[in-house]
Amino acid sequence: MANDKAKGFILHDELIVDLLESGFTPEDIGVLVIAITQYRMGNDLPEMDKAVKGVWNTKVKKLIDIDNEKYQAVCERNKKNIEKRWSDTKSVPEDTNAIPNNTTRIPDDTKGVPEIPIRKEQIANSNTTSNEVVVKPRKSRPESSAEVSEYRLSLGYKGFEAERFFDYYEANGWVQGRGKPIKDWKAAVRNWHKNDYKPKAKDDWLEAIERGVFDG
């Protein structure tokens, strides 16, 4: 399992400083570091108290998963590039005037103009003759920042800037990563709070876990 992942993981200084300032001990942070190694190796996680486990589930594990996804994407891209180069090298015909086997001819009625060879896969992948109608998913958005504020109050979120959340997504067209439309703006509020939440003390993590903001 470890062979499918990058050799290392960057734990940013900002997170360590935030945890120390919030009352987490060096021992707590040491447990997180051990958890990182065990998780990446596919082993059982060490024992963690509720607050430390909340940080793990909310911050650290997510960073590792994102890091692994990026690494896998790079590996996959490199693999495709190698396969493409190898395929292109093998498919070059010795006779430069010859037409490869994976091509076909499109008849041209114009006199004096030679037929144009194109690859069969170009025809297969062409959408010019398709009558299929592509329906884009409908975006989910609140009517105003006041609606966002009302929802965050119902969740008991402290310090959540509803207007900043609304203005940010209003400006980018209510889309998320890679331009995907937001299907549930309330879920986006919850994720925003999880990613933006910076507790002032270790006890704040415990309180947030008890309120169901994070998994403990």
Image (spheres, rainbow, N blue to C red):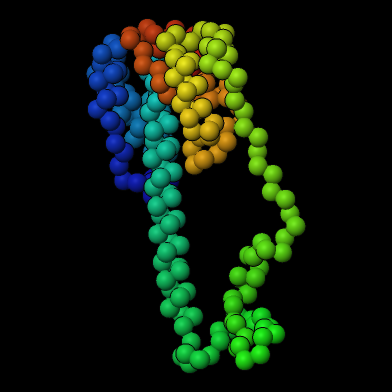
Q: Residue at x 43, y 31 (%)?
A: 62
Residue 45 horizontal side relative to residue 34, left or right: right
In the figure, 138 relative to 22: above or below? Answer: below
Q: Nearer the viewer, residue 168 or 32?
A: 168
Q: Nearer the viewer, residue 180 or 84?
A: 180
In the figure, 51 relative to 2: above or below? Answer: above
Residue 22 horizontal side relative to residue 67, left or right: left
Q: Residue at x 43, y 73 (%)?
A: 86
Residue 200 found in image quarter: top left
Residue 106 found in image quarter: bottom right
Q: Position of residue 184 (x, y in %)?
A: 61, 27
Q: Can you see residue 84?
A: yes
In the figure, 14 relative to 88: above or below? Answer: above
Q: Residue at x 29, y 32 (%)?
A: 11
Q: Nearer the viewer, residue 45 or 55?
A: 55
Q: Nearer the viewer, residue 88 or 201?
A: 88
Residue 71 horizontal side relative to residue 95, left or right: left
Q: Position of residue 149 (x, y in %)?
A: 53, 11
